[in-house]
Amino acid sequence: MAEDGTERSVVKTYIPEYQKDEWRAHADDLDMSQSEFVRAMVQAGRRGFEFDPVQTAPEGSNPGGDELETRLIDHLSSESLSWEELVERLAGDFEDRLDRTLDELQSKNRVQYSGRRGEYVLVGGGDGD
C-alpha cells in the first residue's frame, strides 16, 4: 500500500441498466468519468452535504477537468489503438452524448427537430420563426 493511502482498488456493484444509463448521462453532464462520479456521489452521501465534485474527489483526481485525458487513458488501459481508432472511439462517445442530450432537450420541449428544414431549432425562439 502506498504510504499516502492513494493506492487504488476495484469496487464492483450491480445495478439495473437504466440506472447505469442515468449515472453515465449525469457523469457526462458534469464532465466526469463514471468512476469519479460514483466515488464523488458515495462520498457526498457519506458526508451528508450537498454534492460538490471538487470537494468530494480524492487527491489527484480531476473531476470536471481534462475529461479527454481520462477517457483516453480508459481506452488505452485495455489495448493499444491507432490514431484513427482513438478518434473513432472518442468521437463516438461525443456523438452518443450529443444524441442523449438532444433526446433530453426534445423530451423537455426545449429543442425540436424540423424534418422539413433538416435541422434542430430552439422551441419558441431565436430564429425569427
Image (tube, helix red, strand yellow):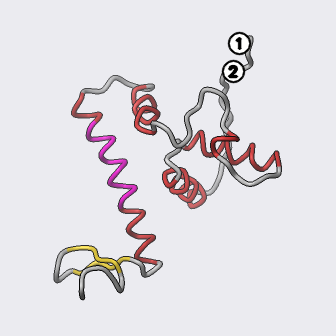
User: What is the three-letter code of the residue carrying label 1?
Assistant: Ala
Going 78% across and 50% down the picture, which residue do you hit?
A: 45
Examine the image and state in which quarter residue 123 appears: bottom left
Point out which mark residue 17 bears. Answer: none
Q: Measure the C-alpha gap from mark 2 to mark 1.
A: 6 Å
Question: Can you say whether 18 is above or below 33 in the image?
Answer: below
Is 56 one of the magenta-colored residues? Answer: no
Residue at x-position 60% and y-position 26%: 60
Location of residue 99 (image quadrant): bottom left
Which region is colored magenta? 87-98
Secondary element under disc 2, as helix, strand or loop, is loop
- Residue 2 bears which disc, if any? 1
x then y, percent, for residue 68? 40, 37
| Callout 1 crowding tier (Cα within 10 Å): few <14, some 14–19, many ≥20 | few
Magenta-drawn stretch contains 94: yes
Q: Is residue 107 above or below residue 5?
A: below
Amino acid on which the number 2 mark rests in the picture: Thr
Nearer-the-camera pick, 36 or 60: 60
Count of number-bearing discs: 2
The reply to whether callout 2 and callout 1 are in contact (CB within 8 Å) is: yes
**Looking at the picture, how far across and down is residue 91, in whole percent?**
30, 45
Quick check: 83 left or right of 20?
left
Where does the image place residue 121, in percent across and percent down from the top left? 29, 77
